[in-house]
Image (tube, rainbow, N blue to C red):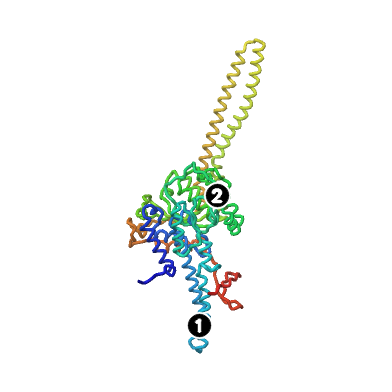
């Protein structure tokens, strides 16, 4: 019998074998966590993560998005290394290689072997400082609240070549290790749908990170940002989990809270793709949620996919794929200015009504003080009349009249205040469309009839997603939806005869195998 060594096989082969194992062993109990591969591939390709970008999935399940992102960037690195090898080989060989004497060809061949061996170290995740080391150690992070899924995801990552431990068993709504606010360039996730966070769920001591050695490590790595990240839990023990989120009073739906969580995890200008129930986009009860995100991020694509895409995994909700990019600092300022201008314009249209109501309230306040003085004087007169045993009827009538005027005045003030409150509410509603008009941008919307998977989970033949990727890629580059990283890497031999990686003026000597 022929013996096989798994450690010598390609990562993709091990990963595919492991996913097949997951699909047959854990289907049912854990099937709800799986996102179809066609959807994972599509969402990753739409956001096009680059080498050096930090990627997260705070509800990572079995790790599908993290693995795809890892492989996607790895392929970019491998392609770049191949290209650099080819160009260096040509420069080493020169134009007349075939005409050279055999001894010189042998010498050149040795030089090429040395160059290739040096560049090969860039693809070794075990060599500190290599490009693959950087990708696997510092760029891929995930959490899952289900302990079995967190372990499954870790193993899945290991089987695909990334085993540095960036996946944690942890509540995805809370900070842990390297997962905290404004840390990530790209987020890809399929959060749990239709569940609610209990209003009584409190942040407890058990949520605190207590490994002091690891805390020192992370503080050294992330600096003051990590100290601030720990406060999310440490400073709120005993408080409601929902109180950490702006939308906690608006909705307890997990998908809503994870939308805010992901937005907070992103750096300014960072981008995210989420699988969401279509109700988030059109349910009237979630209008406030949509307005919240409109004020913090640009929607860069909405893709409606068939409901049967997730039927094989047990889901019955109609899904959409929503892609957003968090505002940059400039966009935050622009949006704030648009909002301020819109509010001023709409308020000006109602200024006469505002002035009239405010005058009524001010007059009522003044009358309140006047009537208070009148009542005090009348009560003193009544007290004196009783003391002098005089007729008190006229004074009592006066007091009754004053109290009635007070009641009428309070009612007038309360009515004016209510009308003013309603008017400001009306102004707020009228301002919203004006803000949208001022802060106007195109939102690409696509409807896919075939997403490459049938209701049974089998592959379909008319997958439209690859074509949409091509079309969208051209569109977002043309419209500069987000800047493309331009950290060109150059390889060359230094004066010591060692091959080095150059990024700008930075020189890194490559390890030699």
Query: For numbered disc 1, what is the local secondary structure?
Result: helix
- Write down the residue under mark 1: 109
Query: For numbered disc 2, what is the local secondary structure?
Result: loop
Q: Label 1: few (<14), some or many (≥20) within 10 Å?
A: some
Q: Which of 230 and 360 is in front in this view?
A: 230
Residue at the far front: name it: 1
Q: Label 2: few (<14), some or many (≥20) within 10 Å?
A: some
Q: Residue at (51%, 88%) from the top-left corner?
A: 103
Compared across the picture, whether 172 is left or right of 398 comes to left
- Where residue 8 sits: x, y (%)? 43, 70
- Relative to 359, is 308 above or below? below
Of the numbered discs 2 and 1, the one sitting upstream in the chain is 1
The image quadrant that residue 225 belongs to is: bottom right
- Relative to 237, is 10 above or below? below
- Quadrant holding the N terminus: bottom left
Residue at the far bottom: name it: 101
| Residue 322 visible to the viewer | no
Q: Residue at (44%, 63%) from the top-left corner?
A: 159
Q: Which of 180 and 212 is in front in this view?
A: 212
Give the tally of numbered discs.
Answer: 2
Circle number at residue 208: 2
- Where residue 478 sits: x, y (%)? 48, 63
Compared across the picture, whether 368 is left or right of 433 comes to right
- Relative to 457, is 411 above or below? above
- Where residue 100 sits: x, y (%)? 51, 88
| Residue 167 visible to the viewer | yes
Q: Which of 222 and 216 is in front in this view?
A: 216
Between tags 2 and 1, which lies in front? Answer: 2
Distance of label 2 from label 1 (alpha carbons)? 58 Å
Q: Residue at (64%, 21%) from the top-left corner?
A: 376
């Amino acid at each position: 019998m022929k013996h096989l060594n798994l450690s010598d096989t390609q990562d993709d082969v091990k990963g595919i074998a492991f996913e097949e194992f997951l699909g047959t062993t854990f289907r049912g109990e854990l099937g709800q966590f799986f996102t179809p591969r066609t959807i994972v591939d599509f969402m990753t390709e739409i956001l096009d993560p680059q080498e050096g970008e930090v990627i997260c999935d705070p509800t990572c399940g079995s790790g599908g998005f993290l693995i795809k992102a890892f492989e996607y960037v790895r392929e970019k690195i491998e392609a770049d290394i191949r290209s650099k090898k080819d160009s260096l080989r040509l420069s080493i060989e020169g134009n007349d290689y075939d005409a050279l004497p055999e001894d010189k060809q042998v010498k050149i061949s040795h030089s090429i072997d040395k160059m290739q061996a040096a560049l090969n170290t860039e693809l070794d995740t075990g060599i500190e400082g290599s490009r693959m080391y950087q990708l696997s150690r510092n760029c891929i992070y995930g959490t899952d609240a289900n302990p079995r899924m967190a372990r499954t995801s870790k193993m899945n990552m290991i089987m695909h070549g990334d085993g540095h431990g960036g996946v944690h068993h942890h509540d995805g709504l809370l900070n842990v290790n390297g997962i905290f606010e404004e840390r990530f360039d790209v987020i890809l996730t399929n959060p749990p749908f239709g569940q609610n966070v209990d209003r009584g769920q409190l942040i407890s001591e058990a949520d605190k990170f207590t490994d002091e050695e690891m805390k020192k490590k992370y503080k050294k790595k992330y600096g003051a940002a990590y100290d601030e990240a720990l406060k999310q839990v440490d400073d709120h023990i005993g408080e409601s989990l929902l109180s950490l989120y702006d939308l906690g009073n608006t909705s307890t739906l997990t998908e809503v809270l994870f939308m805010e969580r992901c937005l907070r995890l992103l750096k300014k200008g960072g981008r995210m793709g989420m699988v969401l129930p279509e109700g988030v986009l059109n349910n009237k009860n979630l209008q406030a949620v949509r307005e919240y995100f409109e004020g913090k991020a640009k929607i860069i694509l909405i893709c409606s996919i068939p409901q049967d895409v997730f039927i094989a995994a047990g889901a019955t909700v109609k899904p959409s794929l929503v892609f957003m990019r968090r505002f940059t600092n400039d966009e935050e300022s622009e949006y704030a200015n648009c909002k301020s201008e819109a509010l001023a314009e709409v308020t000006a249209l109602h200024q006469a009504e505002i002035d009239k109501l405010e005058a009524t309230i001010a007059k009522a306040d003044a009358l309140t003080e006047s009537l208070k003085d009148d009542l005090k004087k009348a009560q003193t007169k009544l007290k004196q009349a009783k003391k002098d045993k005089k007729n008190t009827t006229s004074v009592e009538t006066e007091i009754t009249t004053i109290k009635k005027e007070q009641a009428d005045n309070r009612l007038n003030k309360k009515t004016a205040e209510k009308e003013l409150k309603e008017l400001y509410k009306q102004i707020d509603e009228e301002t919203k469309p004006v803000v949208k008009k001022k802060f106007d941008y195109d939102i690409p919307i696509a409807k896919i009839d075939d997403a490459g998977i049938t209701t049974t989970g089998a592959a379909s033949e008319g997958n439209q997603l690859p074509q949409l990727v091509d079309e969208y890629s051209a569109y977002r580059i043309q419209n500069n939806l987000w800047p493309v990283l331009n950290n060109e890497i150059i390889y060359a031999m230094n004066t010591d005869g060692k091959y080095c990686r150059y990024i700008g003026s930075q020189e890194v000597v490559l390890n030699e195998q």
